[in-house]
Amino acid sequence: ERIERTLNDERFRDVALLGLRGVLAAVFVFHGAQKLFGIFGGHGLEGTAGWMASLGIPFPLASATLAGSTELLGGLALATGVLARLAALPLIVTMVVAMATAHSGFDAGAGGIEYPLTLAVVLASVAIQGPGRFTLPTIVARLAPGSPLESATSA
């Protein structure tokens, strides 16, 4: 009973959402930076565009820029909780496109959809639940009531 009460506590939910957002943010900032800047072992825009062209993705440079920017900026939004629900949506679309173009089968070890599917489902959870209370706007609201950033969590 005590464990159940703890797990049902809203603070626990907020900690869980912070954890989900943190892991998602790390993954998407990492991959976005790889695509855009070639860091963390990535190939940068030109390399990513070349890979996308080899998959038959139209407008490969624009597609690489869009995918990398979505991942990087979406990851930052998830990290801070600023417009996290809204940011989750284009990230889900990016994962659906990845599943449709760059993955086949299910097993991630064999290039399947397992990994982007998992990310899309967890992103959907954040989009539905919201970012929780532990966000940059919440911190700013406590430190500077009336700040324009205060309303950025709800979207």
Image (cartoon, rainbow, N blue to C red):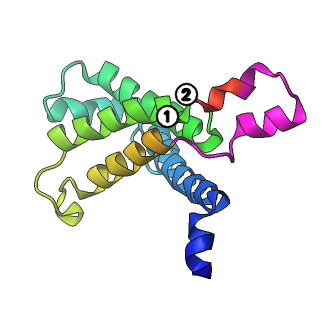
Image-quadrant location for residue 57:
top left
Neighbours of disc 2 within 10 Å: few (<14), some (14-19), many (20+): some
Horizontally, residue 130 falls left or right of residue 137, namely: left
Residue 145 x %, y %: 86, 27
Secondary structure of residue under mark 2: loop
Image-quadrant location for residue 42:
top left
Which residue lies under the disc numbered 1? 85
Secondary structure of residue under mark 1: helix
Q: Is residue 93 magenta?
A: no
Which residue lies under the disc numbered 2? 155
Horizontally, residue 30 falls left or right of residue 79, namely: left
The disc placed on residue 110 is none
Q: Distance from label 2 to label 1 (Cα)?
A: 6 Å
Q: Pointers 2 and 1 in contact (CB under 8 A)? A: yes
Residue at point 30%, 24% (across, down)? 63
Instruction: Please say whether residue 95 is visible from this viewpoint.
Output: yes
Quadrant of the snapshot with the N terminus: bottom right
Give the magenta range: 130-150
Instruction: Residue type at mark 1: give it.
Output: Arg
Give the number of marks.
2
The one nearer the camera, 106 or 20, is 20
Q: Earlier in the sequence, mark 2 or mark 1?
A: 1
Instruction: Residue type at mark 2: give it.
Output: Ala
- Image: 56 above or below 10: above
Residue 121 x %, y %: 33, 49
- Image: 54 above or below 16: above
Horizontally, residue 118 falls left or right of residue 5, namely: left
Residue at point 72%, 34% (across, down)? 137
